[in-house]
Amino acid sequence: MGTPRTIYISGAGIAGLTLALGLAKFGLQVVVLERNSAISEFGAGLQISPNARKVLDNLGLGEAIAEKSFVPEGIDIFPDGRAVPLQTLTLGSEIADRFGAPYAVMHRADLVEILHAAARRFANIDVVFGVSDIAVQSQGGAVTVTAAEPDGKMRRTQPFAFVGADGVRSQTRTDVLDGPEARYMGKVAWRALVPPDRLQGSVRLDRTSLLLGSDFHMVVYPLPHRGAVNLALFTQEAQSDLAVLDQRAPRVRAKGNRRLEAILGAVGDGWTPWVLSTVELENWHKGAVGLIGDAAHAMLPFQAQGAAMAIEDAAILAPLLAASPNAEHAFKRFFALRHQRVRRVQEVSRQNGKVFHMRFPSKLARNAVIRMEGPRGHFKRLDWLYGYDPGGSD
C-alpha cells in the first residue's frame, strides 16, 4: 500500500474536528492546525438538531453526547409578554421517533471537547496547538503549507488538500481564496449563563423558551450538565464595535413584560455581546484549497443550524477527499452537493429573524399562524432539514 493521503485542516473547532474524524475513519492522515494554545472554552449553548446528531452518532459519539446534553420536551413560545405560551412545539421523544435522532442542547465547549477527545484516540490525527504564521500557496492542483509551531520550528509540507475550517473570520477565505470579509447583518447576540435557581418561576426548565418582541427575541434553555441555563438575546444594532457594546447592556423594551424583566434582572450585567455576520460565496475552493462551515457560509443563528451545517459539511467532504482522484475534484463535487441546501438554510434563518422581530400589526398574523399550525406543525415544515442524513445508514 502507498502512503495515505494527508489532509491539513485550519481550525480545531466543530467543523475542523468533525472533518478530521471523518477523514481518519477512511484511513487518511490528518493534521489540524490551531492558533489557540488549547481547545477554546469560549461560547455558550448549542442546539444539536437531528440532521447533525445523525452524523455525530455515525462517528461513534452518540453516547458521549447523550451524557453531556439535554433533550428539551418542547419549545414554549411567548410573544409580547404573554403569561402562558401561545404554543408549545413538541420535541422530546416524538422528534427523535420522526427524524431518527433526538433534538438536544449542550454547551459548545462540551461538544468541542468530545470531538477532541475522539480525535486523540486516532493515531492518524495530529492536532497542533499554538500554531502561527500559517501560509498557504495554491498553484495548479498543488498546495504548499508553511506554519510556525509553538517551539519556533517551521513546518513546510505539500498535502493532498488544505481545508479552511477557520470560522466566520476565515483567513483561508480572505487570504488564499481572495474572498470577502464577513458581512455584519445589523444584529447582535447577547449571551449569558445563569444558575437555574435565578430563573425559577420565570421559565420551565424542562423546555426551551422563545420570547418574541418588537425588534428582539430571546432563547432560553437549560444546560443541566453545566449547572446553568443558557440565554441568548438577539437585538438589532447599528453598532458593531464589540469594545463599545461591551460597555453597555442590551437595549430592549421590557416594561410590562414580567418574564423578560425577571430574566434581565437575573443576568444583570453578565451579558457578552457577539456581532452576527454572514458569508455568501459563489465558490468555496481554489485548486487543492477548500472551505467548510462558517468559513464558507456563516449564517444567522435563527434556525440554530450554523454548527449543524458544518457537521453536515464534514460528513459530505470526508468521503470525497478519500476517494476523488485529486483535491480539486473533491471540492468541486462538495460544492455541487452542498451549496443549494446551505443557501436554503441561510435564507430560512434570515427570514426567521424578520418573523421573530415583527412589530404590530404584522405580528398578529405571525401569532395566528403559530397558533394554527399546532404543536407539531414544525415537523412537516422542517422535514427537509431534520430528515436529512448526510452520512447515510452506514
Image (spheres, grey):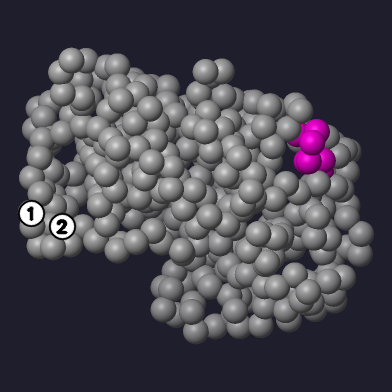
Query: Where is residue 92 shown, x and y percent of the image?
Result: 78, 41
Q: Which image quadrant: the N terminus? A: top left
Q: Up-down: is 359 above or below 104?
A: below
Q: CA distance from mark 1 to mark 2?
A: 6 Å
The magenta stretch spans which residues? 89-95
- Is the residue under label 2 in contact with that under label 1 (CB below 8 Å)? yes
Tell me if I can see residue 257 in this picture: no
Q: Depth check: 284 or 60 in front?
A: 60
Residue 154, disc: 1
Residue 360, disc: none
Q: Up-down: is 163 above or below 319?
A: below
Q: Depth check: 57 or 280 in front?
A: 57
What kind of element bears circle 2?
Answer: loop
Query: Where is residue 393 shown, x and y percent of the image?
Result: 56, 18
> Which residue is labeled 2 in the image?
149
Look at 20% across and 20% down and name the residue there: 326
Seen in the image, is 334 located left or right of residue 108? left
